[in-house]
Amino acid sequence: MNPQLHLSVVGIDVSKASLAVCYLRQEQVQHLEVSNSKTGFQQLVKACGAQCLFVMEATGTYYLALAYYLHEQGGQVAVLNPLVIKRFIQMHLSKGKSDRKDAQWLLRYGQQQAVKIWQPDEQVLVECRQLEQVTEQLLKQKTMVSNALEALQQQPIISKQALKRLQHTLKVLTQQVQAVEAELLTLLEQRFASEMTLLCSIPGIGRKTAGMLLLFAGGFTRLDNYRQLIAMAGLSPREHSSGTSIRGKVRITKMGGGLIRGKLFMCSFAAKKFNAACQALYNRLVAKGKNGKVALIAVCNKLLKQAFAIIKSGVPYQADFTSKIPLKA
């Protein structure tokens, strides 16, 4: 049984403009539709009360303002991975789809399953993630302009004005990326000064990667074991086989964490040379016939294990260090 059943459960299907709400009143299912705005939030609390368990999906950024408001009002908020509720609906063989039905399924999930209560991130982490998103967008624009510039330079006739504009745009974007990355790193170093020092003690991990890793893991405060960190980064192995049916090779999941995976992969080249544990792992796998890329992915996993152990123990990197942290299931 769900230990949170003493609370009334409210299912909320969130979209950009509106909220489809499903709740119980005297054991009868009730539906309500309000705007996804502060006025709508107030109408929701007036109808359902604040002391409830509000269950919703993580729909981009559209749920955040609602989640913060309900948390401030003293409500318990559960934010589900959309895939989890999708599988729950499929398991019950539901047919048809609408916002009202989705809200009712969220209500049922909250009644039947134990859910993890959502907690808002501290302000500095929210600001850092916004800067990280800006960096991503600028890098995408920079890649597009760089490709356009390369294509232009391959043509037999080249407009000097077009060439000048593209070169200027590329220069401006490069400067903006550098400026935003510097601002982001400054914020992270101010918030996680000691953690940054610990992570930078690991051979192969530099300041930028240390900062990105702390941001990605939320300062490691909500992680119980390194396996959670590896799964978040999409570096867990995934096998497709059943009986005699084998569908390809074992590959990593690549679910989430694309930026940190890229950074770690670049770090793995230095780690396999200068990090004793990573070097031993890489050499052992290559000796067994594994290709270089597979061995480097294993090095990425090793770096995450080291990062988790070092942050949790507070002990800087030591080549012969053995973690005394118990591994939790």
Image (spheres, rainbow, N blue to C red):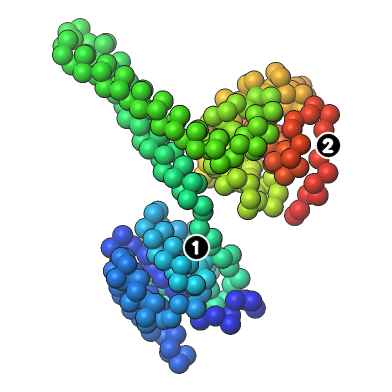
Residue 141 - label: none
* Mark 2, residue position: 322
**Based on the displayed image, in which of its 4 quarters is residue 133 positioned?**
top left
Residue at left offset 48%, top offset 67% = 71
Mark closer to the chain start, 2 or 1: 1
Which amino acid, mark 2? Answer: Thr
Q: Is residue 220 left or right of residue 138?
A: right
Residue at left offset 46%, top offset 42%: 128
Is residue 207 visible to the viewer in this orientation of the structure?
yes
140 above or below 1?
above
Q: Secondary structure at mark 2?
A: loop
Mark 1 crowdedness (10 Å alpha carbons): few <14, some 14-19, many ≥20? some
> x, y percentage for residue 10?
45, 76
Task: Give the answer, above or below, for where 64 lies relative to 162.
Answer: below
**126 or 329: nearer the viewer:** 126
Residue 179 location, x and y as percent?
40, 28
Residue 106 x/y as whole percent: 47, 71
The image quadrant where one finds the N terminus is bottom right
Q: Secondary structure at mark 1?
A: strand
- 160 shown above or below 285: above
Q: Quadrant of residue 250?
A: top right
Task: Pick out the residue farthest to the front.
Answer: 190
Q: Quadrant of the C terminus?
A: bottom right
Residue 252: in sight, yes or no? Answer: no
Q: Which of 167 and 199 lies nearest the eye of the viewer?
A: 199
Residue furthest bottom in the image: 26
Residue 297: give x, y in percent of width and height. Answer: 63, 31
Q: Disc 2 to disc 1, how far (Cα)?
A: 37 Å
The residue identified by callout 1 is 79
Q: Which residue is drawn at the image coordinates 60% and 45% (left, top)?
A: 219
| Labels in figure, total | 2
> Mark 1 is on which residue type?
Val
